[in-house]
Amino acid sequence: MRIGELSERSGISRDTIRFYERNGLIESQTGESETNNYRNYPDDNLVKLEFYTKARSAGISIADLRDIMQAISGRCDADLARSVIRNKIAELRERAERIGNVVAFLEDAVDKR
């Protein structure tokens, strides 16, 4: 499918789709026509885009998504993939704890006023 159809079916803007492609999170192939530069996007990009939308709304960065997707895409061995994902989970838990500390500090500061 072309980018317009992918955008329509996924509910994600063309610019965001291009951003994900530039960051190696989705792939496309050159079209068969020699007279245009249209790109074809495989259907599996719909599943990926849904995952990225949920991950981004949960606060996962593009860098984290790249690491996770590289680990689960088979570009590295299974043990390394599990290690990358476990490390990301640990990093996210650490970030969540720091954010929780900031929220508690701010709530305490507001309550004292």
Image (spheres, grey):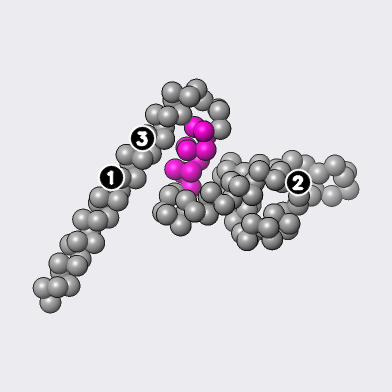
Q: Position of residue 6 (x, y in %)?
A: 69, 54
Amino acid found under the numbered disc labelled 3: Asn
Query: Which element is circle 2 on?
Result: strand
Is tag 3's residue or tag 2's residue first in the polypeptide sequence?
A: 2
Q: Is residue 21 visible?
A: no
In which quarter of the view is residue 9 placed?
bottom right
- Pointer 3 residue: 87
Is tag 3's residue or tag 1's residue first in the polypeptide sequence?
A: 3
Residue 49 located left or right of residue 88? right
In the image, residue 35 lies in the stretch drawn in magenta: no
In which quarter of the view is residue 7 placed?
bottom right
The residue lying at 80 percent from left, 48 percent from top is 37
Q: Position of residue 16 (x, y in %)?
A: 59, 56
Query: Which element is circle 3 on?
Result: helix
Q: Main secondary structure of the magenta part?
A: helix
| Residue 25 numbered tag | none
The residue lying at 47 percent from left, 38 percent from top is 68
Say if mark 3 contacts mark 2, CB within 8 Å. Answer: no
Locate the C terminus by quadrant. Answer: bottom left
Q: Residues within 10 Å of mark 2 (few under 14, many from 20)?
A: some
Q: Residues within 10 Å of mark 1 (few under 14, many from 20)?
A: few
- Pointer 2 residue: 40
Residue 99 located left or right of residue 105? right
The residue lying at 62 percent from left, 53 percent from top is 17
- Pointer 1 residue: 94
Is tag 2's residue or tag 1's residue first in the polypeptide sequence?
A: 2
As drawn, the residue found furthest toward the bottom would be: 113
Query: Which element is circle 1 on?
Result: helix
